[in-house]
């Protein structure tokens, strides 16, 4: 895995034209892009195909969550797109459906969303969940491993515990990353790129610190340099 590919840049912008302009500005520094549901209904699928043809890797952050049979059919359709990662929520039936829908597609990896990095222990309590956040992340990582998913989305704060329990069986993809001094925005469980890698994250998903930077290519390269130094 190249250092450039360890940084997944989230295309959290209003239109695919904005995304294309951003991708052009980032140039060679961008090797792996995330497309979420901000762009999915307005041309994001075509953009994903285009990026694939340009040799970029694609993370489809669709966070599926439905009955297993529906997830299975949805993932079967997504597999035809040629993405590299697809997210689904970490519930046993959802994960089983996703793994079945992916079938023997060698490229598409299924990632389980454990606990969103924008949530804190207090947010869980508001949802009626009194389990310790880290224990919930580990429980959901276990669902992922049991279902045969490829990895998890988890904060770097939980990455060490996931790596200790599951070794190389699960890839760890980590959002909520902020270079030292950057604004946290709505993220709560934030760490620096170097700390995330040292904690065991395989790849980092970064949005605003790159896409809102005056020079996004330079911001991406700075994060990649930090990743390389910590790897
Ligand atoms: O701008 P920022 O760096 O906070 O963006 C993080 C990206 O990672 C967003 O696109 C967000 O949807 C995504 N993400 C997340 N937490 C998860 C899964 C994905 O923040 N658990």
Image: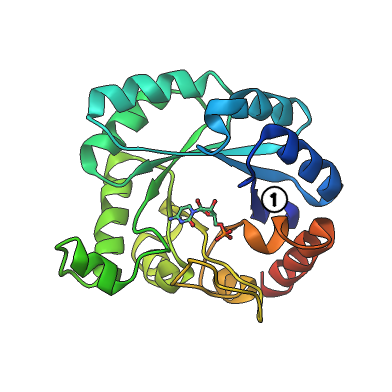
Is 86 situated left or right of 101 in this image? Answer: right
| Residue 155, x across and y down, in percent | 45, 65
Q: In this view, does 214 lie above or below 72?
A: below
The residue that appears at 19% across and 60% down in the rendered structure is 127
Dot 1 falls on a residue whose secondary structure is helix
Q: Which quarter of the image is occupied by the C terminus? A: bottom right
Q: Is residue 151 above or below residue 128?
A: above
| Residue 139, x across and y down, in percent | 24, 59
| Residue 182, x across and y down, in percent | 65, 75
The residue that appears at 68% across and 33% down in the rendered structure is 16
Q: Is residue 103 visible?
A: no
Is 70 situated left or right of 106 in this image? Answer: left
The residue that appears at 72% across and 66% down in the rendered structure is 223
Q: Nearer the viewer, residue 16 or 45?
A: 16
Q: Nearer the viewer, residue 90 or 21?
A: 21
Q: Is residue 196 above or below residue 167?
A: below
The residue beneath circle 1 is 5
Count the marks: 1
């Amino acid at each position: 895995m190249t250092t450039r590919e360890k940084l997944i840049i989230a295309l959290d912008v209003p239109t695919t034209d904005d995304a294309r302009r951003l991708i052009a500005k980032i140039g060679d520094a961008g090797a792996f892009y995330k497309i979420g549901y901000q762009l999915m209904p307005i041309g994001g699928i075509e953009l994903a195909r285009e990026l694939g043809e340009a040799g970029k890797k694609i993370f489809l952050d669709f966070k599926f969550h439905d009955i297993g049979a529906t997830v299975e059919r949805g993932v079967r359709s997504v597999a035809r797109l040629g993405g590299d990662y697809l997210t689904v929520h970490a519930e046993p039936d959802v994960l089983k459906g996703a793994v079945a829908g992916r079938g023997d597609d060698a490229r598409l990896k299924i990632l389980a969303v454990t606990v969103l990095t924008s949530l804190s222990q207090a947010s869980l309590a508001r949802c009626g969940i009194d389990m310790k956040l880290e224990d919930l992340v580990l429980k959901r990582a276990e669902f992922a491993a049991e279902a045969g998913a490829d990895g998890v989305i988890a904060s770097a704060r939980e990455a060490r515990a996931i790596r200790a329990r599951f070794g190389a069986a699960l890839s760890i993809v980590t959002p909520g990353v902020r270079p030292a001094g950057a604004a946290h925005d709505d993220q709560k469980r934030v760490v620096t790129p170097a700390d995330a890698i040292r904690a065991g994250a395989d790849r980092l998903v970064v949005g605003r610190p790159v896409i809102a930077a005056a020079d996004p290519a330079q911001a991406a390269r700075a994060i990649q340099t930090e990743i390389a130094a910590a790897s």
